[in-house]
Amino acid sequence: MTIEVENLSKTYGTTQAIDSLNFKVEDGQILGLLGPNGAGKTTTMRILSGFLPATSGTARIAGFDVHEQSMAVRQRIGYLPETPPLYPTMTVEGYLHFVARIKGISAGDRAEKVMSAIRRCGLIDRRKSLILKLSKGYRQRVGIAQAIVHDPPAIVLDEPTVGLDPQQVVEVRKLIQSLAGDRTILLSSHILPEVSATCSQVAIVNHGRIVATDSLDNLMTQLTRGGYEIEVGGDISDINGIDAAVQAFLRNVPGVEAVEAITVEDLPEGRYRFQVTIEPGSEPGGAIASAIVESQLNLLEMRRTRASLEDVFIKLTTEDSPIDETAAIVEPASAALNL
């Protein structure tokens, strides 16, 4: 286990920034710490990287306690704060040599380590450029390079794509994914597509507490109910008659929880649409289709509906608001150098 956090808390006076956080990041995983601004993500990152003491609780990086064994932790972690710790008048290569020297890489290994970081981050063509002349996307690459130059087993990235244009976002995401496998990565973000596109696991944080942690697919399966949207046709000429017929044939299908008629203004005459809500973890699509066919109604269309990540995120980060189990979308079936 590369990163372990147990009952981690931090208070500033009377303000509880984080409250009893618990999570683990397995070797080679990318865990996204997802939450709105002010949720406690940056505080957590600063504690893990050794720049901020926790009020209580423990955190370990590669088996070393962040508080008790701070120097050992700093040798094994790479940290990229939201604003990269860059010196604009230095060249990319010169800056990374400077960082490598401060991080204790021996003179004999320094050139190899620096060049390895440059290659991994796609900076070969920019290594002689002044940092001040780089685009924001390339400056972010340099920031990631300084985080991995000493080849740490764990990398902590705070909002790594904030302020980038869409093309730069895609490039940085690919870079982050390429670093996983032989490293464990913890990144924070308030951007839903960021976590969805990059991370294998997610921990959702709200008001300093983790309110859910799992893979994205499991979170959406466990916390929301999706279902099927079906369109049928038949000889019954009114919606009440169709509704009764559909209810009669579907209510006993295992995994079906509810059936509700949907009003669609421009639906052609003789066609009717329904939302079938299913139990979490069930996939009774085949049985639903068979039941409709056996009812002598015409099954004209059937589409799987799933809860969106936005639905899960909004409900989990809205205080005192229960999960909307029917929400669905339709888819076709310097100090920062960490020294």
Image (cartoon, rainbow, N blue to C red):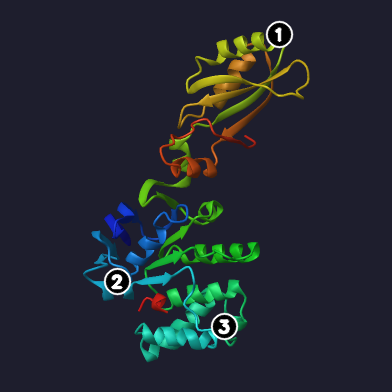
Q: Measured from the top left, where is residue 50 in percent x and y? A: 31, 70
Q: Quadrant of the C terminus?
A: bottom left
Front-lying residue, 190 or 303: 190
Q: Which residue is mark 1?
A: 236
Evaluate whether residue 4 shows in this view. Answer: yes
Q: Could you tell me which secondary element the residue under label 2 belongs to?
A: helix
- In the rendered structure, the answer to whether residue 55 lies left or right of residue 270 reads left
258 w.r.t. 326: above or below? above
Q: Nearer the viewer, mark 3 or mark 2?
A: 3
87 w.r.t. 23: above or below? below
64 w.r.t. 94: above or below? above
Q: Residue furthest bottom?
A: 107
- Label 2: how many Cα within 10 Å (few below 14, some 14–19, many 20+): many
Q: CA distance from mark 3 to mark 2?
A: 28 Å
Residue at horizontal 44 percent and vertical 82 percent from the top: 113
Q: Quadrant of residue 232?
A: top right
Q: Which residue is mark 2?
A: 73
Q: Measured from the top left, where is residue 24 in percent x and y? A: 33, 55
Q: Measured from the top left, where is residue 143 in percent x and y? A: 49, 75
Dot 1 amino acid type: Ile
Dot 2 amino acid type: Val
Evaluate whether residue 1 shows in this view. Answer: no
Marks 3 and 2 close (CB-CB < 8 Å): no
Q: Which mark is residue 313?
A: none
Disc nearer the start of the sequence (1/2): 2
Q: CA distance from mark 3 to mark 1?
A: 72 Å
- In the rendered structure, the answer to whether residue 56 lies left or right of residue 156 reads left
Residue at horizontal 57 percent and vertical 78 percent from the top: 123
Q: Residue furthest left?
A: 68
Q: Which residue is mark 3?
A: 131
- Label 1: how many Cα within 10 Å (few below 14, some 14–19, many 20+): some
Dot 3 amino acid type: Ile
